[in-house]
Image: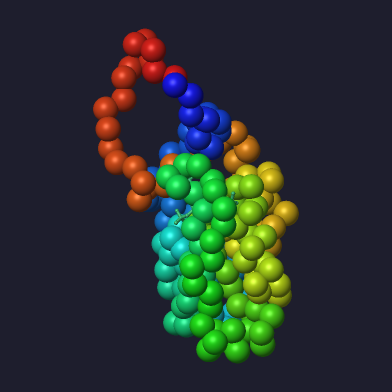
Amino acid sequence: MTQSEPSEQQRAGRPFPVSWDQFHRDCRALSWRLNELGPFHAVIAITRGGLVPAAIVARELGLRVIDTVCIASYEHDKQGELQVLKGVSDQTAKLGGGTGKGLLIIDDLVDTGKTGRMVRSLLPEAHFAAVYAKPKGRPLVDTFITEVSQDTWIFFPWDTGLSFQPPLKDGAA
Ligand SMILES: O=P(O)(O)OC[C@H]1O[C@H](OP(=O)(O)OP(=O)(O)O)[C@H](O)[C@@H]1O
Ligand SMILES: O=c1[nH]c(=O)c2nc[nH]c2[nH]1
Ligand SMILES: [Mg+2]
């Protein structure tokens, strides 16, 4: 029997769980920064992880034109080939003059930077913001809030739930 490769999450090792409260606070902090850099014509969420931060940022900045770039790459926690399932609409592309100028792209995080690189190639002049950044992805984003190490796996509140934690003396990490 062949042993399966460790997932990106297993390789990352270090867990960084984020609560809804913390995520909302971090998205508000991102909005503060972006408010100084705008105005923007529209927000583009990189689905699916970018949908929640995009909603919060759009609310804070008073933006009502919201579009998506739909990209699939990680199957649970293993990254495969990047697939663009849907690009921005013609209407949004026009607002950005074809190059993305004045458009705001939002994602929850940049990790290896593969997703960011793909989106930048589609809209090179757009402003790209993520809530969290790992070192490899950091050069791809214009604005982010918190940097975590490359060996960290961020657990988002929509992927997690409350569960019992064994006491430290019983071997909890
Ligand atoms: O910098 P990278 O190594 O490309 O990784 C970052 C991307 O990975 C995750 O998305 P994922 O592909 O898991 O899809 P999802 O947003 O639908 O969960 C995350 O939301 C980013 O979009
Ligand atoms: O939930 C996630 N946490 C991460 O740290 C990560 N990196 C890429 N894709 C990810 N998804
Ligand atoms: Mg994503």
Front residue of 74/22: it is 74
Taking the spot 44% from the left edge, 82% from the top edge, the residue there is 64
Q: Is residue 20 above or below residue 48?
A: above
Residue 43 in sight in this render: no
**Relative to 168, is 29 on the left or the right?**
right
Query: Number of callouts in the render?
Result: 0
Colour scheme in the image?
rainbow
**Relative to 116, is 89 on the left or the right?**
left
Residue 109 at x, y percent in the picture: 55, 53
**Relative to 104, is 161 on the left or the right?**
left
Front residue of 89/14: it is 89
Quarter of the view holding residue 93: bottom right
Residue 96 in sight in this render: yes
Residue 5 at x, y percent in the picture: 52, 30
Q: Is residue 101 above or below residue 25?
A: below
Q: Is residue 47 above or below residue 78?
A: below
Taking the spot 34% from the left edge, 42% from the top edge, the residue there is 160
Residue 131 at x, y percent in the picture: 54, 55
Front residue of 74/136: it is 74
Residue 28 at x, y percent in the picture: 48, 61
**Quarter of the rendering occupied by the C terminus:** top left
Taking the spot 60% from the left edge, 47% from the top edge, the residue there is 111
> Outermost residue, front direction?
1
Taking the spot 44% from the left edge, 21% from the top edge, the residue there is 1
